[in-house]
Image (cartoon, coloured by chain):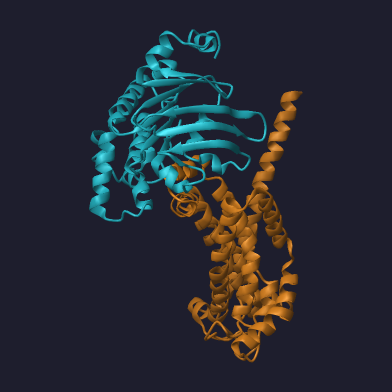
Amino acid sequence: MVDPKIVVKDLNIDYGGAPALKDMNFSVMDKEILGVIGPANSGKTSFLRALNRLNDLDLGCRMKGSILLNGKDINREMDAEEVRKKVTMVFALPIPLPMSIFDNIAYGPRRHGIKDKKKLEEIVEKSLRAGYLWDEVKDRLTSSAMKLSGGQQQRLCIARTLAVEPEVILYDEPCSGLDPISTAKVEDAIRELKSRYTQILVTNNVKQAARVGDKVAFFLMGELVEIGEANQLFTAPKDKRTNDYLTGRFG
Amino acid sequence: MRKFREAIIEKTILLNGFACILFVVLIFVFLAKDGLTLFRTIAIQDFLFGQIWSPLAEPPQFGILPLFLGSLFVTVGATVISVPLGMACAIFIGEIAPRWMREVLKAGVELLAAIPSIVIGFIGMTMLGPVVKSLFHLPTGLTAVTGSIALAFMAIPTMVSIMEDAITSVPRTYKEGSLALGATHWQTIYRVIIPAASSGIVAAIMLGIGRVIGETMAVMMLTGNASVMPKTILAPVRTMTATIAAEMGETVRGSEHYFALFAIGLVLFGITFLINFLADMARHRKKK
């Protein structure tokens, strides 16, 4: 029996008003891709932000329950920086930092103490290759990352998270601002990374969750309605609400 | 009828816009007219690089180098003190302080800007001067350093409020992007937020310096007003602004001395113009 990578226990979150997440309980296995779907305001982003403790930045945010990573409580037994190094996030809008392509990728490793130039170059190349971007940018690593196209910027952001050698990668609607071709490339990258990382993909695009996810969770109004194998959930959902959402009755 | 009203309003606004520029141009023209008259009788290099300012001597000498150095010492001193303090303050307000404290501090900083310079000069004279005197064992506490410290406190509010604006207008996503990669808060401030806000920060420093150079009342009270070549920053100095303020009342209109003061004004105008120009360049550099 393999221990799960992430365990969510009785997770409740609110931002001072109505709860954003209610009594969540589930686990994610190592090297699994979990797709999270649900309409707006269903708590998907709150959930991701709890996983790498970005919710700490919101002063009004209150959290109950616990999240375990490799059996350790991320809020009580780990530093925020340690959590965020192991559990990195790719945001909805690609946000390259205002510096060169090289520096964007090297940013994470440098902050974690890697100074050797050779080593950094190695990491940058490896990460860009893994993010399917190397061939497009290898001749202009010193130019500003802000000049890349939207799809390239998003793959840069993925490559940047890979450079810190995380264990878990979170995606917050990573393709919401991208065209279909760029989306396909990002999805390819996600599938390619499956051999090494546990990945959680929050998406508004139900079909994307079906294409990429091993398992899929359906969130509604802060509640986990259903979680299951992607095939099962899409073909024979157990809960009526899941079925309604998938067939387009609401959302 | 509506069209007519629109036209009138538009013209009025246009006129007001031009009026501002017109005033600046007129000020410059009058300053230049009287200032440049001096150079009919005095060589420009004797004026700019002469080491003695002695308008009442016979023959009078109008070398503004000691005054220029006075301004320079005071300004550089004030900058050295105010930039680190101001930056630390702006970073604390913009990034670190909890929300309630942020509001209190911002109000406090704005209040500091509202203190009249004469009050700062007064406090500096009675409190700061004696401290400087006993600290450095000087014959007088009214020196360039005293002026620098007081001016630093006058420059800090300007700097802090502009820097703080620049820091808080750095997109929140940059900060989150950096934190999500496992960088610490300080690493994020130092590596991402400050570089992203750098143009605003430079502009803030420039405007702070502009404020310091132009300040008259407090420096007149605090720097000792000795128009001799300053050897150290612990010596009494006299700035260009203080010279104009102190001597304008005693000159004969149309005399050499009178024109010399206008020429100093012209030099000051040039310096502040340059600083504002650089600040503007810094501010727009990023936007291109």
Q: Is residue B247 visible?
A: no
Q: Measured from the top left, where is residue B214 in percent x and y? A: 63, 67
Q: Measured from the top left, where is residue A197 in percent x and y? A: 33, 33
Q: Colour of chain B?
A: orange
Count of labels shown? 0
Judge from the rendering whether residue B192 lies leftward or rightward of residue B95; answer left or right.
Answer: left
Q: Nearer the viewer, residue B235 or A79?
A: A79
Residue name at image x 63 percent, y 78 percent: B146
Which quadrant of the figure has residue B223? bottom right
Judge from the rendering whether residue A232 lies leftward or rightward of residue B198; answer left or right.
Answer: left
Residue name at image x 66 percent, y 50 percent: B20
Q: Nearer the viewer, residue A105 or B109?
A: A105
Residue name at image x 49 percent, y 40 percent: B173
- Residue A179, relative to residue A45: is it above or below? above
- Residue B39, relative to residue A159: is it above or below? below
Q: Colour of chain A?
A: cyan
Q: Is residue A134 visible?
A: yes
Q: From the image, which quarter does the C terminus of chain B lie in?
A: top left
Q: Measured from the top left, where is residue A115 in percent x and y? A: 30, 56
Farthest residue in the front direction? A1
Which quadrant of the figure has residue B78? bottom right
Q: From the image, which quarter does the N terminus of chain B lie in?
A: top right
